[in-house]
Image (spheres, helix red, strand yellow):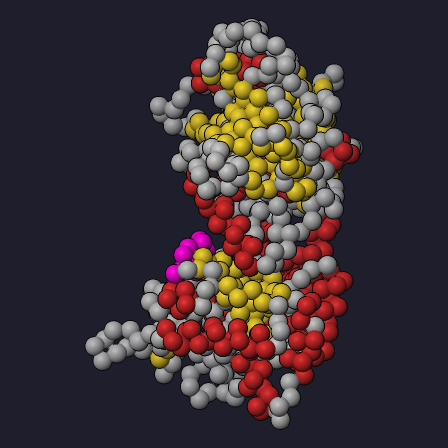
Amino acid sequence: MGLPAAPAYSATSAPRVDLLVLVVSDGGPATEAITAELDGEGTPYTVVDLQQSGRPVIDQAFLADTVDGAPRARFQAVVLPNDNPFPTGSAEMAALAAYEKAYAIPQVDAYTYARPQVGLEPAASSGYSGPVDGVKAQVTAAGRRSGPFGYLNGGVPFEDNSPAVSESYAFLARPAAGADFTSYVEAPMPGRTGNGSLVGEYRHDGRRELVVTFAYNQYQEQFKLLARGMVDWMTQNVRLGASRNYFAVHVDDVFAGDDRWDSALNCTPGDVDCPPGQGVEDSIRMTPADVRNAVAWQKSRGFTLDLAYNGGGSVEYRENHNGTDGLADELVKDKAEFRWVNHTYDHAFLGCVQDVSAVPWKCATNPDGSTRWVSQSEISKEISDNEQWARGAALPTEPDELVTGEHSGMKLLPQQPQDNPYLAPALAANKIDWLGADMSRDPEQRQVGSASTVARYPINIFYNAGHVSEQVDEYNWIYTSRTQGGSGLCDDLPDTTCLPAPLSTATGYADHIVPLETRVALGHVLGNDPRPHFIHQSNLAEDRIGYPVLDGVLDQYKALYAPSAPLVNLRMKDIGAELRRRGAWNTAVKSGRVTAYRVGDRVTVQAPAGVAVTATMPDGTVQVAGGTTVAFGQAYAGSVSGWVSAPSGQSSLTLALAPAPAGALAPLSRPAPPANHGTPQRAPRTPVPAGVTKPVPYAAERR
């Protein structure tokens, strides 16, 4: 089980360690969750699937070799589904143990049984094993101070989305007597006194293991909270890839009014969901007091909203109100308090010409049967007129950003299966670089002419609701079955569940909709996802129903995260640029065109020309270029991270690390001789509850 022979080298001539994670998978949700986190961060990894025939054999040749005569560790970390997924006495496990010892390679036991082999007392005899749905775990003092979870405030709530389904399972146990075990995350042991470990570090035989004793999947909040720390621990904060928590909120239709939901007709008079001539149009529009409230709210929360504006709405309002528009006057007075995004002049539909003679509408056709499209000149006028109006009001806009009304012009199923062919040339003519898209129907960044799309998450607070009662009534119509008096849409649409009964118009918003939408949005925030969310100006008017959800996200985030990991609040073009860099980086990583390794305190990265590198490094890391150095990255969650490119004319970049923290294990000065590990014992099979195998949705929701 020894490593390949190599020439002796001194402690000052450290081995090369490639910045690549080895994931040994059993196909279970725990290892899948970790690979999803690595994918999201942009961290390269190699998977060995134990279920695949013909998989690589994990032996000394697979794990390490030499480069130019010097030893190389091919992986900087090892992730196993448990502490030993191989048959008892496996040569592969022995090879891994020897490799980890020789090169100080950390090992993550993704979900394992509490037992002395991992430094814990047996859960069955002295701890607890069973469901932990709804448990409030805590990061220990060691986990915050010297461990990998210092970016958390302390609490780690476990989800409990359905009382009928078990959504997590854990083995809670104390450290075994004499074991060098440091618990990082703990929870009370039901039926016993004291806490048991859920995540901890076990040091033994010159090796380090991160021992995780609870089941999880990539979608659960408890994993999202701990995932960053798990990756930080396994890579010792030296890795390719990065993670931050982002939150941006666009407010659409500013200066315009939004048509109001009719609770008797169950449609919106003036919009395409109501047959022509039905109902009386009634507009919801912000007031000057709503603007003052928005400004005060932003200041109190330290958060900036992006206002997607329609200048034609103000012009029309003045025409109908003797030239006055208090809303526009107040917004223009406070224009510097917000960010502004062009939302077209009149909020016109810019796709096909709509035939609204029936519900649902359809695309109008020419005599030859071809689709009638809104023309390039009409699209261009909507863009340019709105930008010209903004210049007249001296709004601080970015003229290369655009969100079309209803994301129109882009494909919209089922009526319009392709983009309006005139959209792309209109965008180019107006020098639009960033185009808002609807995450629910166009999630991936793509090019539309000159523009890259920026998908936006819709928060399920309706544009046609200014009052709580309207929101709940429409919500009931959409999400209750026909037998409950609803529309039955939830019966017919895939991936949509129905409410068991209509919500109370008095309490349903605060008790059901707000917590649900808060959890959904917070899930995006905790997933290293920079894409913005959007609501409408109507939600800041009247009952101001948008704020409870925004406050819910901000309050919960503040309760969960330490100040070292602040929310990142970017404007649309910066989000688009982040997505574009990630796309190029991920393509390069997946195609094997990125190489990175560490030798001592130097990290060398090679990537294709024009592809920026994303990395996370210890505080104090600098980029070395010739005889000069410059600080690398920005501080976030206890390390520094960011994007960096090779100096002009060079094919690689070099980062110099700060000194390693005390207590870190260093590679031996030469590969270790074969060690006598005894007979490696296969880990017992750990149960995976149904709610982990198949994630339980938060509640009735169009997913």
| Furthest-left residue in this view | 368
Residue 583, relative to residue 519: is it above or below? above
Nearest to the observer: residue 673 or residue 471: 673
Nearest to the observer: residue 648 or residue 611: 648
The percent position of residue 7, horizontal first and vertical second, equals 52, 7
The percent position of residue 160, horizontal first and vertical second, equals 62, 48
Residue at 50% x, 46% y: name it: 581
Residue at 53% x, 26% y: name it: 597
Q: Let me know if residue 619 appears in the view.
A: yes
The percent position of residue 624, horizontal first and vertical second, equals 60, 31
> Image check: 499 left or right of 631?
left
The percent position of residue 504, horizontal first and vertical second, equals 63, 70
Nearest to the observer: residue 690 or residue 579: 579
How many marks can you see? 0
| Furthest-front residue in this view | 627
Magenta-drawn stretch, dominant element (helix, strand or loop): loop
Residue 325 is drawn in which quadrant? bottom right
Residue at 34% x, 64% y: name it: 418
Q: Let me know if residue 701 appears in the view.
A: no
Magenta stretch contains residue 445: yes
Nearest to the observer: residue 687 or residue 424: 424
Which region shows up in magenta? 439-449
